[in-house]
Amino acid sequence: MPRATFCEWPTLALILATSSAWILVIGLYSELGPLVVCPLAAILVTLQSSLQHEVLHGHPTRTPALNEALVYCSFGLCVPYRRFKSLHLRHHNNDRLTDPYDDPESFYLAWADWQKLPRPIQLVLTINNTLVGRLLIGPVVSVAGFVGAEIRMMLAGDKAVMRAWAHHAAGLVPVVLYVTLVGGMPLWLYVLGVAYPGMSLLMLRTYAEHRAHEQAEARSIIVEFCPVFSLLFLNNNLHVVHHANPRAPWYRLPQLYRAARTQWHERNGGYVFASYFQLARHYLFKVKEPVVHPIKYKETSGFPAAEKAVS
């Protein structure tokens, strides 16, 4: 969807409001204390991650360098924006969605790779396919897999990856200095009490975002009623609409969905939940799918349905 104006003001306003709120909340750490600051800052970490997703899709301006500058300092600490952008745009090849090798955001494994894993790791990945597991250990599982792959690429001499991490490190310097010197917050507390739960909250969205399915459009979810989460995730609960219109800004997605609600349900094969509460009732302690991809490797897996982890 082409943009008619140079700047999308709702997105710019939200970026500035999120950054300002984070600065204010962290700056008041000594007065408010960790019980107030940590949950508020974690929510802002999640919101900034959603905004980084918006930015990598070309918002709020037509100038990529300016867009990147607006989210250059990552409050979540772990994922370089440039790597997120590169991998996520590859993920938007809908024909390859959920493929263990071709989709960099797939939570699925190929059967052969699964068979090579030690039993304790298999158990961890299986627990990670419950919602409670994804929320509790999902950030560790994802970051460990992601960082391990990134280190291997840098050791192999991938200069683009090195540059991305160098930019990420430069952006972390003001974040760490502000947290520790201005806010007076211990860095370990920020990591465990803000960055980690912020990423965990984001995984509520990514937990069931995609499924293995023969039809490409049926691989992306719709979660309907979630006014708070809709803002926090910038309407990516309507994920099939986003994948069909990746250039549409976040505030246009509900309108696109409402205009053809029945057709969207048909297009995504009824992969619809009324809310994240309904999703939690189904999968809080239940494995949503096995880890092995059920379609691409169904001849060898013996599983009816599946999912892998890196987001």
Image (tube, rainbow, N blue to C red):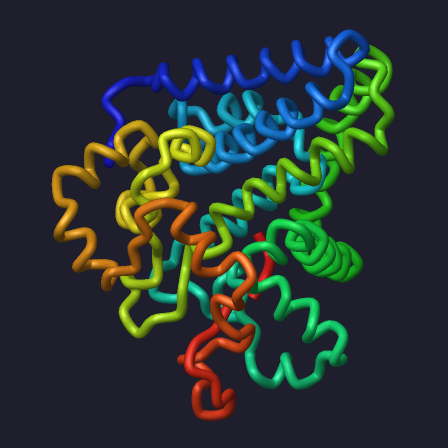
Residue 79 sits above or below residue 130 on the image = above
| Residue 158 visible in this rendered orientation of the protein | no
For this view, does 143 lie left or right of residue 230? right
For this view, does 177 lie left or right of residue 273? right
Which residue is drawn at the image coordinates 70% and 20% (left, top)?
A: 37
Which residue is drawn at the image coordinates 27% and 36% (left, top)?
A: 253
User: Residue 225 occupies which quadrant of the picture?
Assistant: top left
Residue 66 in percent (x, y) is at 51, 21
Residue 27 in percent (x, y) is at 73, 10
Instruction: Work out whether residue 159 or residue 209 is closer to the camera in this orientation and state it.
Output: 209
Residue 175 in percent (x, y) is at 74, 22
For this view, does 134 lie left or right of residue 276? right
Instruction: Work out whether residue 111 or residue 127 is closer to the camera in this orientation and state it.
Output: 127
For the N terminus, the image quarter is top left
User: Residue 272 occupies which quadrant of the picture?
Assistant: bottom left
Which residue is drawn at the image coordinates 86% and 14% (left, top)?
A: 181
Residue 59 sits above or below residue 121 on the image = above
Instruction: Work out whether residue 281 or residue 38 is closer to the camera in this orientation and state it.
Output: 281
| Residue 137 visible in this rendered orientation of the protein | yes
For this view, does 221 lie left or right of residue 45? left
Residue 20 sits above or below residue 111 on the image = above
